Image (cartoon, rainbow, N blue to C red):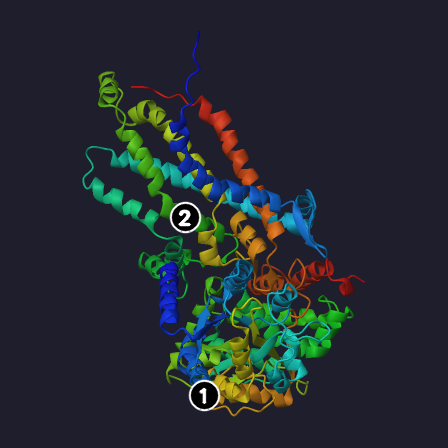
Amino acid sequence: MAQRKAFRWHIMVFLAPAVLVYTAIMIVPLFGTLNLSLFNTTEEGRVFVGLKNFATLFGDPRWSERFWNALGNNAWFFLVHMLVQNPVGVALAALLSSPRLRGAAFYRTAIFIPTILSFVIVGFVWKLILSPIWGIAPGMLDAVGLKGLFAPWLGREGSALTTLALISVWQFVGIPMMLIYAALLSIPDEVIEAAEMDGVTGWSQFWKIKLPLILPSIGIISILTFVGNFNAFDLIYVTQGALAGPNFSTDILGTFLYRTFFGFQLQIGDPHMGATIATAMFGIILLGVSLYLFTVHRRLRRYQF
Amino acid sequence: MTKTIRLALLASTMLGTAAWAEDVTLTVESWRNDDLAIWKDKIIPAFEAANPGIKINFAPSAPPEYNAVLNSKLDAGSAGDLITCRPFDASLELFKKGKLADLTDLAAMANFSDVAKSAWQTDDGKQTFCVPMASVIHGFIYNKNAFAELGLEPPKTEAEFFALLDKIKEDGTYIPMAMGTTDQWEAATMGYQNIGPNYWKGEEGRKALLAGTQKLTDEAWVAPFRQLAKWKDYLGDGFEAQTYPDSQNLFTLGRAAIYPAGSWEIGVFGPQIGGAFEMGAFPPPVPAEGDKCYISDHTDIGLGLNAATKHPEEARKFLEWVGSPEFAELYANALPGFFSLNSTPVEMQDPLAKEFVSWRQNCEPTIRSTYQILSRGTPNLENETWTASANVITGAETPEAAAERLQKGLASWYEPQQK
């Protein structure tokens, strides 16, 4: 006669604090936002409108144009991070983990420091560095005879977004570097030694032995970058303001949401359309993360040592 | 950081109330963080001396965030007792939502003309909800020393204006005009709204736009954009990335000769220049010799009462004082460039402020075209005008295309423009 196991209360007790806090500050507001996007204010007060707000967002050319513009800019912002931040992060980690490098601790700290700075500081400092009037960038380029290359990058439609993306890369390159560095350090010496015995050294050792072993970390970094970029707001707001100039060329979903939800200057905030945009952002991020989880993440091979 | 300060403030007010239980502290919400010192040193002591038992706490936030911050605070019930009012719809909306109290019966309202009150009234003019404090006038401030050095005279007409800019550019010592397009509002407020009234004939054009008899694509509304497009050549290197503080500094450091301005700069520029050079001002140049001149004399600041305040009596007492000639004199002189809207004439000391206000005698005043009613819908005409003006200056949009876009946006929700 099988006796039923006693209910294990301690599991619930240990889970409770995290679940309660997470529910109160994340899950409830999330559903509040989703709910808000289904309402709108009319003369009779707040009424349920179903998916009409989404119809406006995607159907009304003025709304949809801004939305697709923001989404496109956001995609470019993410692409620059993927193409610059992560490869550079991996390269830096590979260099740092090289046993022959002197002063590795210093480089590691110096490269990681910007990450702990506030967006506001980073935004203002770079805005000053690149200022055509007081900035040191024009002077420095002049010193090496490349003055002609300087342009007011943050003020030009063509270059503003890329410049901002690179500033963000500069700030956050320390994170992939640290994660990859940790992954590289955790590769057991036996594996490396075995590779050396087989004559796999130098570059081919990196490509054939180390890279496959750190791929899961790169995957995690990519997804963190994706979520971080599609939620980005601060840097653009600090450097270009809520109108994300010039001519909306740096407008990303975060600034679009801010302008709509809270209003800006004479524009009065519209919480319902704001919630609609927030829901769309949530959907995009959810889609991206799921796509990653179900297609890439499951196929990654993990090695047990 | 701010949180710590806020906590400290909160703690100190709590301790304060414990010790002086009879004192009432009124908090004033404002976007004028530049005026913190003036409120602390002049306005608040003057009021507190005459009204023992009421303490005033002036708590400003940054101008671009003010509306958003205020709306959230009012919704959350944490806003101060007195609310500095933006003109027209931003405040009207708050009044309609019941966030601002009706002040029609305030005795001090008798001190203001209907035009002065119009920015803070319901559309039918029956209810007033903010005490008018000040207006600002647009024009151009110039470096008198630079003009003397190059032998230049302030221009009267558009042609003279550009001839003057050409001369300054040719000489090369000074940047002809200090303005950037990064912040966008500079281009719209100090550009479009500054020179525009001369073309759309002030109130006449503004009212016609409201009535739907003129369109933004009419010559009168496109012409100012055409002027702005020509400004590009006279702005400093890299003006595309030049911010508002950059422009201010370029002028006060004496590197630029002309600054397209709002009169609120007078109080800021004076101490910054510190006597290094003298400033003069000229009104926006008219299209042709002998044309009537129009200036933007924009009702900009009012003070309202938070409907949810715990101390309505004390707050009303303060508002009565803000509406008095005594306050008008104090404010206009403490903040040269903010012109009192009080019907009692105010004697001002600052020569530059006097110059600005003297234009009221010859020129027709008007308010900024986008502020009343026209920025009620989405897309918001004022915000669209920012982008359009900046685009026209950088050359990203032609004047005609920008006007076309503004008109399309406005017509999409404003009925009189849909015919």
Q: Please indicate, yes or no, whether residue A79 appears anywhere in the rendered image.
A: no
Residue B58 on image: x %, y % = 45, 73
Farthest residue, direction top = A1
Label 1 or label 2, whichever lies nearer to me, is 2
Residue most extreme to the right: B419
In the image, what residue occupies the spot 73% across and 60% down?
A: B411
Give the left or right position of residue B88, taking residue A222 as reference: right
- Judged from the image, the secondary structure of the residue bearing numbered disc 1 is helix
Crowd around label 2: few <14 · some 14–19 · many ≥20 (10 Å) = many
Q: Is there one chain holding both mark 1 and mark 2?
A: no
Say which chain tag 1 marks.
B
Residue A185 position, x and y percent, is: 26, 30
Residue displayed at 26% across by 27% down? A202
Q: How many numbered badges does the structure rendering display?
A: 2
Under mark 2, the amino acid is Ser
Apparent side of residue B192 relative to residue B239 in the rendered image (left or right): right
